[in-house]
């Protein structure tokens, strides 16, 4: 919008770590996109690198934390002066809030028609926006860049379950050990709501990877669950209370000490508990969801009444082993070309192209920072 507006007044409430978006140069991109095997390796490499840096930063790993901060500082030093960098540098651990990747944000911020205000907004008036520093910006359009509500989940929607139970509005008590916040077994199903499945449910946000990977696995499981009902001539399926409770207890335990629990407020949290983010890597989620045993972890209902057991279902193969599935994916990746030794050069070429490209991009960024600082002295 900076290019089409006469003036842009940017009110920054909480700054983000903004890292440079490192892309392939023209020649490496041409080579990788021309070879299907290299292209698939590159697609696997991107989420791996993202999790290696961002997930470890969330976990508080010193090297990952400082890598994020270093890349963010380089990106800022290219365009912002010292006073602006001080005002827009986050003061919370890397990973506690969303980490952004952009090569165009800071160049837009320093344009003459952009005015940055870090004091916050006091109120809206007939004349415009009044900042906390009493500055008045006369405007005709307001864009709420953070205009969404994540807590409570499904805000504004009243979902009624079995016995008119309201979704995630349980009273505290021994029978409701997860009361008071949104919860679901692997983010897809919750007790008391038969045949209700979530996509992008509680604790399935990916702070270090693409949520599309989670959506794909959730869609596979939901399809598998309803195929199970159809094949067995059952009416409904519902997660067991103890299974959901144990899963949520594990999540709360694993969330302790992570970056987003070290700040006072975050849309990741509700009542101090992590209700939004997955605590591991995408592969772990995929494997755990694929390995769910429907017969063991869910209660099966027939004609509206719960069955104590499902005879014969134990022999059905409705759960896929996560380890076997991962090995199959690896096998398809390694042996798609008939002769394995043919791929050795491809691995070498891929390594040289990707690592070399990243090294050159970072070296170029560092050199530009040095030159800018040198000429500003």
Image (cartoon, grey):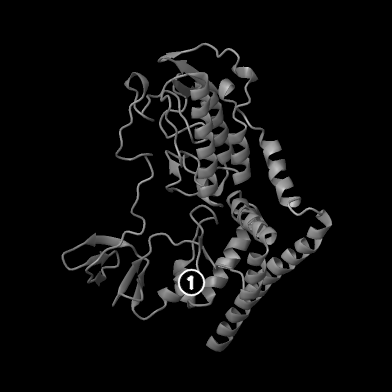
Residue drawn at x 63%, y 65% is: 33
Q: Which residue is mark 1?
A: 85
Task: Tell me the quarter of the image containing the C terminus.
Answer: bottom right
Task: Tell me the quarter of the image containing the N terminus.
Answer: bottom left
Residue 56 visible here: yes
Q: Residue 36 is drawn in which quadrant? A: bottom right
Q: Position of residue 131 (x, y in %)?
A: 28, 65
88 relative position to 26: left or right: left
Please rate how many residues cluster around mark 1, counting C-alpha atoms within 10 Å: few if below 14, some from 14 to 19, many from 20: some
70 relative position to 190: left or right: right
Residue lying furthest left in this view? 126
Q: Position of residue 263 (x, y in %)?
A: 48, 49
Q: Residue 327 is drawn in which quadrant? A: top right
Residue drawn at x 64%, y 57% is: 49
145 w.r.t. 215: above or below: below
Residue drawn at x 67%, y 69% is: 31
Which residue is nearer to you in this view: 133 or 28? 28
40 w.r.t. 175: above or below: below
204 relative position to 57: left or right: left
């Amino acid at each position: 919008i900076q290019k089409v507006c006469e003036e842009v007044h940017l009110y920054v409430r909480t700054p983000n770590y903004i890292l440079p978006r490192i892309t392939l140069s023209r020649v490496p991109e041409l080579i990788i996109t021309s070879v299907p095997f290299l292209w698939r390796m590159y697609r696997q490499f991107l989420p791996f690198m993202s999790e290696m840096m961002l997930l470890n930063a969330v976990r508080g790993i010193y090297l990952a934390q400082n890598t994020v901060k270093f890349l963010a500082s380089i990106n800022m030093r290219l365009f912002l002066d010292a006073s602006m960098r001080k005002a827009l540098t986050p003061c919370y651990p890397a990973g506690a809030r969303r980490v952004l990747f952009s090569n165009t944000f800071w160049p837009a911020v320093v344009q003459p028609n952009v005015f940055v205000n870090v004091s916050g907004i006091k109120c809206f008036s007939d004349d415009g926006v009044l900042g906390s520093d009493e500055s008045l910006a006369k405007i005709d359009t307001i864009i709420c860049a953070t205009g969404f509500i994540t807590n409570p989940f499904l805000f504004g929607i009243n979902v009624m379950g079995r016995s008119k139970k309201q979704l995630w509005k349980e009273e505290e008590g021994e029978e409701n050990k997860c009361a008071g916040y949104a919860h679901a077994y692997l983010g897809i199903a919750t007790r008391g709501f038969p045949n209700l499945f979530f996509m992008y449910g509680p604790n399935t946000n990916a702070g270090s990877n693409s949520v599309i990977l989670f959506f794909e696995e959730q869609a596979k499981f939901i399809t598998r669950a309803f195929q199970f009902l159809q094949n067995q001539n059952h009416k409904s399926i519902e997660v067991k209370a103890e299974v959901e409770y144990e899963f949520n207890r594990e999540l709360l335990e694993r969330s302790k000490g992570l970056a987003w629990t070290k700040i006072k407020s975050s849309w990741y949290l509700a009542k101090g508990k992590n209700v939004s983010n997955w605590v591991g890597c995408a592969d772990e989620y995929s494997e755990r969801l694929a390995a769910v045993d429907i017969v063991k972890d869910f209660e099966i209902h027939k004609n509206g009444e719960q069955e104590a057991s499902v005879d014969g279902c134990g022999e059905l193969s409705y759960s896929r082993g996560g380890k076997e599935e991962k090995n199959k994916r690896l096998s398809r990746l390694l042996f798609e070309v008939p002769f394995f030794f043919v791929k050795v050069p491809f691995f070498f070429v891929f390594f040289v192209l990707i690592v070399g490209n990243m090294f050159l991009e970072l070296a170029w960024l560092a050199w530009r920072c040095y030159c800018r600082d040198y000429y500003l002295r």
